[in-house]
Amino acid sequence: MKHVVRLVDGHLVYDGLLSSKEKASIDEILRVLQEEIPTIEADLEEEYGQGVWYKYHLGLFLGELLEKYNITISERRKFWDEIKDLATKEERKRNEGAHSVTRSFYQQCYILSQQDKKTVEKLTWRQWQDLLDRVGNREDERIFDWIKQLTEKIREDDWREFEKALHLYLKEKDTSVFGTEELFSIYDSIMLMCKKWREQFKVFSKNHPKSAKNKTKATWAKKYYTLCFAKKKELSSIVVTEEMCYDAFSELIN
């Protein structure tokens, strides 16, 4: 599919100069999309609700479309936009950005469908979106293996903090130098750091309800993560330890 279409002021516009045969081919693809996408979305919502398995199975279907219509990687963003603008009956309110394929709902469903089922079930859809939005955080694909081996569900607030802290940690980092066990230990320690932040700040907030820090919690969280990583570097440690977490919080907040 080398040509795509879009809506301009309610009218269908074809990109590029098309022969009548090419135009007929695109019209056929759009007809199929307009018939199949609403049906598959409705069926999946009825069976799975709006949760992660809805998105996983939708992604499997989208993968079939990519293969069926020979959609190249460079064409995918426009193809996802065609589905969103011309085929689906679902209202996608989330701002996906004009050019970023990584924030496309359909692209994220497709990526999710490429993961092992045991990996998919570990996170909620909101948590998956946090990870899929941050390309740098999943650049080392072993993070999916780490997620798969998790033994318990992660709290939504801990996961959000983990994503922020991991993004901070990965700046100018090449994780390929780490063995898988080492990398998993790093991920575990970052999660520990985030949990200790939540636990300690909850106590602080209860004891100091009028503190200005309560209103700028996110700013202090970033300072805390930065200090934890600095202590890790100072001690030439691969991971952040529980002691570092307590020391950093005490030094920064208390």
Image: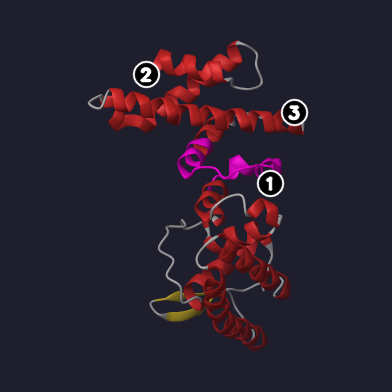
Comes first in the chain, label 1 or label 2: 1
In the image, residue 225 sits, relative to residue 94, either above or below, namely: above
Residue 198: % across, % down: 43, 31
Q: CA distance from mark 1 to mark 3?
A: 21 Å
User: In the structure shown, which secondary structural element does the residue marked by tag 3 occupy?
Assistant: helix
Mark 3: which amino acid? Val
Q: Nearer the viewer, residue 146 or 22?
A: 146
Distance from the alpha carbon under mark 1 to that under mark 2: 34 Å
Disc 1, SS: helix
How packed is label 2: few (under 14 Cα within 10 Å), some, or many (20 or more)? Answer: some
Which structural element holds mark 2? loop
Q: Amino acid at mark 2?
A: Ile
Label 3 neighbourhood size at 10 Å, few (<14), some (14-19), many (20+)? few
Q: Can you tell which quarter of the image residue 235 is in?
A: top right
The residue carrying mark 1 is: 148
- Image position, residue 210 (x, y; %): 22, 26
- For residue 177, the mark is 3
How far across and how far down the image is residue 215, in percent?
28, 32
Task: For the C terminus, give its image quadrant.
Answer: top left
Q: Residue at x 40, y 80 (%)?
A: 10
Q: Is residue 23 above or below residue 58?
A: below
Q: Note whether 14 is above or below 150 in the view shown.
A: below
Q: Nearer the viewer, residue 6 or 50?
A: 50
Residue numbers of the magenta segment = 133-162
Would residue 172 be found to the left or right of residue 72 on screen? left
